[in-house]
Image (cartoon, grey):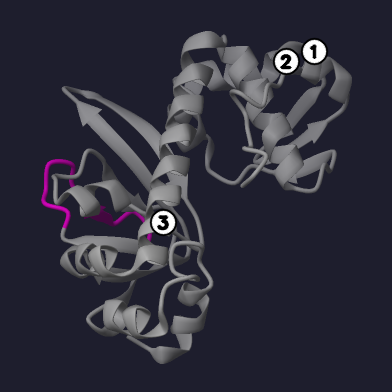
């Protein structure tokens, strides 16, 4: 692995507090690789041999059953994914594929578990990251089960506007096919919901969204920190 990427990895919350010698031991057998778009990296049910770190690009985490498929998350730089499976030495519950040209760092799961047993700061950071992932999944489940399709879309747009610095205009961070799956819709139902939001303060022009009436959009979505987050101490 190229040493130039080590400082960026070291700054991640999962690694920033661990002892330097343990960080070097953890990354000694790691390697980085660049993948083109739409490459399936892992299949659900396979053994979790590596912890994945996204350095550039984006990853779709998804699962399938019979002829159905759903998007569970989209991972962007710089962050890890599949940590829980690595820690439990258990099969992946999700598959992963690249959405664009993506650079990853792959760290052997066995090394992650070894350092977890010997480095208290790394262990605490691992627990914190797993807890954040669990709370994120609970929020997403509440969003899917408690809100209508239009309410979910409105809440998502408000969150994205906030991530863009509360701008009235921003570009969706994922293509609409992936967004529809993430929000529990078909592409057709997403298109209908997007059009219906014109009367509630949001207009879409391709991948760009313009919020024309924020109070109206908030009245529809009813944003809640218990669903939309974030945790105050994170």
User: Sequence-wise, which precedes: disc 2 or disc 3?
Assistant: 3
Q: Nearer the viewer, mark 1 or mark 3?
A: 3
Q: Observer-nearest residue: 97 or 190?
A: 97
The answer to whether one can see residue 177 in this image is no
Q: Is residue 31 left or right of residue 137?
A: left
Residue 51, image quadrant: bottom left
Q: Is residue 75 left or right of residue 26?
A: right
Q: Which residue is depicted at the point 16% across and 60% down?
A: 49
Write down the region rendered in magenta. Answer: 37-48
Disc 1 marks which residue?
Answer: 219
- When the figure is inspected, residue 81 is found, relative to residue 102, above or below; the finding is above
Disc 3 marks which residue?
Answer: 124
Residue 29, image quadrant: bottom left
Q: Observer-nearest residue: 112 or 188?
A: 112
Can you give x and y, in whole percent of width and height, for residue 53 in the image?
A: 38, 64
Q: Residues within 10 Å of mark 3 (few under 14, many from 20)?
A: some
Q: Secondary structure at mark 2?
A: loop
The number of numbered discs placed on residues in the rendered structure image is 3
Q: Observer-nearest residue: 144 or 206?
A: 144
Q: Which residue is depicted at the point 44% across and 69% down?
A: 15
Check contact, mark 1 vs mark 3: CB within 8 A: no
User: Sequence-wise, which precedes: disc 1 or disc 3?
Assistant: 3
């Amino acid at each position: 692995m190229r040493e130039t990427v080590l400082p960026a990895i070291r700054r991640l919350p999962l690694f920033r507090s661990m002892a330097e010698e343990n960080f070097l031991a953890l990354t000694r057998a790691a390697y980085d690789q660049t993948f083109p778009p739409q490459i399936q990296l892992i299949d659900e049910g396979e053994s979790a041999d590596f912890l994945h770190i996204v350095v550039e690009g984006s990853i779709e985490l998804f699962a399938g059953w019979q002829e159905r498929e759903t998007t569970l998350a989209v991972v962007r730089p710089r962050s890890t994914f599949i940590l829980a499976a690595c820690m439990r030495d258990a099969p992946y519950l999700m598959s992963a594929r690249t959405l664009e040209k993506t650079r990853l760092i792959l760290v052997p799961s066995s090394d992650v578990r070894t350092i977890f047993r010997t480095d208290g700061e790394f262990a605490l950071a691992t627990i914190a990251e797993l807890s954040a992932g669990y709370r994120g999944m609970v929020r997403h489940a509440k969003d899917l089960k408690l809100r209508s399709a239009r309410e979910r879309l409105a809440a998502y747009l408000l969150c994205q506007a906030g991530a863009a610095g509360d701008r009235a205009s921003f570009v969706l961070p994922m293509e609409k096919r992936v967004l529809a799956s993430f929000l529990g819709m078909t592409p057709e139902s997403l298109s209908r919901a997007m059009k219906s939001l014109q009367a509630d303060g949001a207009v879409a022009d391709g991948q760009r969204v313009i919020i024309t009436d924020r109070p109206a959009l908030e009245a529809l979505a009813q944003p809640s920190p218990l669903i939309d987050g974030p945790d105050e101490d994170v």
